[in-house]
Amino acid sequence: MRGLNRSIVALLALLLILCIAVPEMADAAALRQGSSGEQVKTLQSKLKRWGYYNGNVDGIFGSGTAQAVKNFQRKNGLTVDGIVGEATARALGMSLTGSSGGGSSSSGGSSNSGDKDLYLLAKLVHGESRGEPYKGKVAVAAVVLNRVKSSSFPNSISGVIYQKGAFSAVSDGQINLSPDNESIKAARDAMNGWDPTGGCLYYYNPKKTSNKWMLSHDVVLTIGEHAFF
């Protein structure tokens, strides 16, 4: 009987160790405060380019980087814990060490849907803002995404883009042009959280529009030939 009790105690102890160790092993690739290296540099570069991080790109995951990650997570509807696990890495377009494949190779239907949305958004960017500075291309993509989030517009990227009269590139057929690499990159940056407009829902070219409603609004910022509000 005493031997059986010892076996039960040993088994319970083993189960307890496994319960502690397995989550740690599963999360071993995550980036968190105290991490360092090239992946942290990549993380800091992305967050800095998108306006979440103001510190040095030094590859050291300190409190400033953790706060920037939290701000990114909050903006993108993720768990706000300051840790770059799989979900946050996916939103950042990053691949964690030890995970399979790149940021765009996730399995499942949502990845295919995401790829289609990305490509359609890139086509809109290409049709609307060829010749604009890169920041302006990202801004055009961000306007589309801001509309998706707004209750005043359709709740999908395709719905917003193909809303009647919304974009001249759809009306004149330029939406059907193949996007270049820069337009695809701009669309991806916008989908990963970079919004140079700060939440704007509209833009126009003052040199090309006579729309009194557009012209009656105060311009928040101008990037290239486009005014945003």
Image (spheres, rainbow, N blue to C red):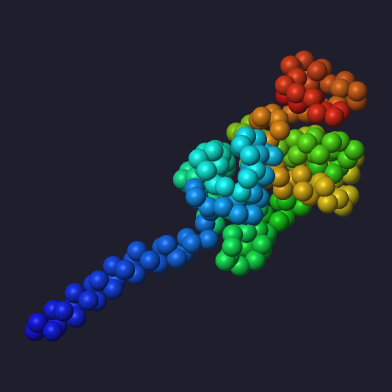
Image height of 144 relative to 15, above or below:
above
Image height of 217 relative to 102, above or below:
above
In this rendering, position of residue 70 left or right of residue 154? left
Image height of 122 relative to 99, above or below:
above
Q: Is residue 120 visible?
A: no
Q: Is residue 32 visible?
A: yes
The answer to which of 30 and 215 lies nearer the viewer is: 30
Residue 130 drawn at (x, y percent): 88, 40
Residue that protrudes farthest toward the left in the picture: 1
Residue 14 drawn at (x, y percent): 28, 73
For the C terminus, give its image quadrant.
Answer: top right
Q: Residue at x 86, y 22 (%)?
A: 206
Q: Residue at x 66, y 29 (%)?
A: 198
For the N terminus, give its image quadrant.
Answer: bottom left
The answer to which of 84 and 120 lies nearer the viewer is: 84
In this rendering, position of residue 176 left or right of residue 200? right
Q: Residue at x 14, y 83 (%)?
A: 4
Residue 97 drawn at (x, y percent): 59, 62
In this rendering, position of residue 44 left or right of residue 19? right
Give the image quarter of residue 163: top right
Residue 203 drawn at (x, y percent): 78, 28
Give the image quarter of residue 147: top right
Q: Residue at x 49, y 62 (%)?
A: 28
The answer to which of 67 and 160 lies nearer the viewer is: 67
Report the number of discs.
0
